[in-house]
Image (cartoon, rainbow, N blue to C red):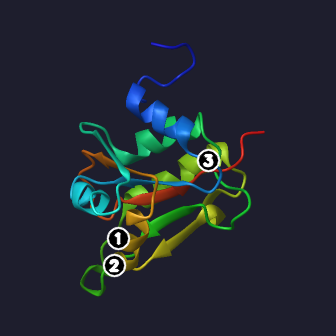
């Protein structure tokens, strides 16, 4: 245990966050996200945080890692498929509230990728973090900024 470090951040995840450099990205996938299959072909680090939701993980990560200020949208969501256009995704509103606590851009720090583009971008991430999140479309990619 360490003082001042959120307990949800496992030793393995802390190591990964420390290894990541400016511009590196971490994909946080919901319980349905194919994290292991996305990570294997590209040799990115795949970690599991079952039993935790994505928003609480975002909150913990942003306590120790800044978002990239050199890009307009360091937080990227997965767009809904056409068949799901009418679905409300309330967790996205929670993500934006959480990001606003750590980054003055708030909701303006968010962009999105079409579903299959999101998968391709996830494969290029330094780490894919698989969670137990039960909300659908709860996947997000965070881009690390410079620690000043």
* Residue occupied by mark 1: 119
Q: Which mark lies nearer to you, 2 or 3?
A: 3
Q: Quadrant of residue 3?
A: top right
At x 63%, y 50%, the residue is 100
Neighbours of disc 2 within 10 Å: few (<14), some (14-19), many (20+): few
Circle 1 residues within 10 Å: few <14, some 14–19, many ≥20: some
Task: Work out whether 51 lies above or below 25.
Answer: above
The local secondary structure at tag 1 comes to: helix
User: Can residue 10 be seen in the rendering of this structure?
Assistant: no
| Residue depicted at x 21% and y 58% | 32
Nearest the viewer among 4 and 26 is: 26
* Residue nearer the viewer, 83 or 15: 15
Q: Mark 1 touching mark 3, by CB under 8 A?
A: no
Helix, strand or loop at disc 3? loop
Which residue is identified by label 2?
Answer: 116
- Name the residue located 57 percent from the left edge and 18 percent from the top edge: 4
Q: Which mark is residue 21?
A: 3
Real-space Cα distance between discs 1 and 2?
5 Å
Q: Is residue 50 left or right of residue 76?
A: left
Percent x, y of residue 31: 23, 52
Q: Position of residue 115 (x, y in %)?
A: 35, 76
Quadrant of the snapshot with the C terminus: top right
From the image, state whether disc 1 or disc 3 is nearer to you.
Answer: 3
Q: Are marks 1 and 2 in contact (CB under 8 Å)?
A: yes
């Amino acid at each position: 245990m360490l003082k001042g470090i959120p307990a949800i951040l496992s030793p393995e995840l802390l190591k990964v966050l420390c290894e990541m450099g400016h511009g590196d990205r971490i994909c946080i996938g919901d319980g349905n996200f194919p994290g292991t299959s996305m990570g294997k072909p590209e040799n990115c680090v795949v970690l599991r945080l079952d039993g935790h939701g994505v928003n609480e993980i975002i909150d913990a990560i942003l306590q120790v890692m800044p978002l990239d200020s050199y890009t307009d949208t360091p937080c990227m969501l997965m767009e809904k498929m056409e068949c799901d256009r009418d679905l409300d995704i309330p967790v996205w509103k929670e993500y934006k509230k959480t990001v606003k606590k750590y980054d003055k851009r708030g909701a303006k720090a968010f962009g999105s990728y079409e579903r299959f583009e999101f998968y391709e971008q996830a494969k290029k991430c330094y780490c894919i973090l698989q969670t137990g999140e039960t909300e659908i479309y709860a996947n997000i990619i965070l881009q690390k900024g410079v620690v000043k």
